[in-house]
Amino acid sequence: MFHIYCPWCEEHREEEEFHAKGPAHLVRPKEPEACTDEEWGDYLFFRDNPRGVHHELWVHAAGCRKFFNITRHTVTYEILETYKVGQQPAKAPEAEVVTLPVRHELTEDAPDDVRVKVGGLS
Ligand SMILES: [Zn+2]
């Protein structure tokens, strides 16, 4: 059990009151109707799997019910900061993106560890 600081309530509350809602700062395509099906599908369904410091969108579900962002290290689970939606983080992401190959890329020759380092976030 640990505590998360809600920037709206301005106090630490038990983690069970919160839910992660995915990566923060996703940018919706300005003209969705101009996207290909693949581009729109990527926006809707596919997310990076960073290892390291990155930004996540959370909601204080059992509290004020407001959304906010967390800068968190995905390996150590350390929360470096929380900030309201619309604000910018003080800490930059420092993560490498780890992706799993899609099903059709898996073969009998695939190594046991199928994680592939794609590169760091900028
Ligand atoms: Zn709150």
Image (tube, helix red, strand yellow):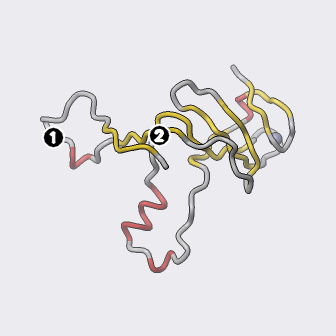
Q: Which mark is residue 89?
A: none
Q: Quadrant of residue 49?
A: top left
Q: Mark 1: give few (<14), some (14-19) or many (20+) Cα within 10 Å.
A: few
Which residue matches tag 1? 107
Give the amino acid type for the residue marked by disc 1 in the picture: Thr
Q: Position of residue 46 (x, y in %)?
A: 43, 53
Q: Quadrant of residue 53?
A: top right
For marks 1 and 2, give the CA distance: 24 Å
Q: Residue at x 44, y 67 (%)?
A: 40
Tell me the quarter of the image containing the N terminus. top right
Q: Foreground: 107 or 97?
A: 97
* Left or right placement of residue 104 versus residue 60 in this view: left
Q: Nearer the viewer, residue 42 or 64?
A: 42
Residue 50, label in figure? 2
Q: Residue 103: image x %, image y %?
A: 26, 46
Apparent side of residue 34 relative to residue 15 in the rendered image (left or right): left
The quarter of the rendering in which ligand 1 is drawn is: top right
Helix, strand or loop for disc 2 = strand
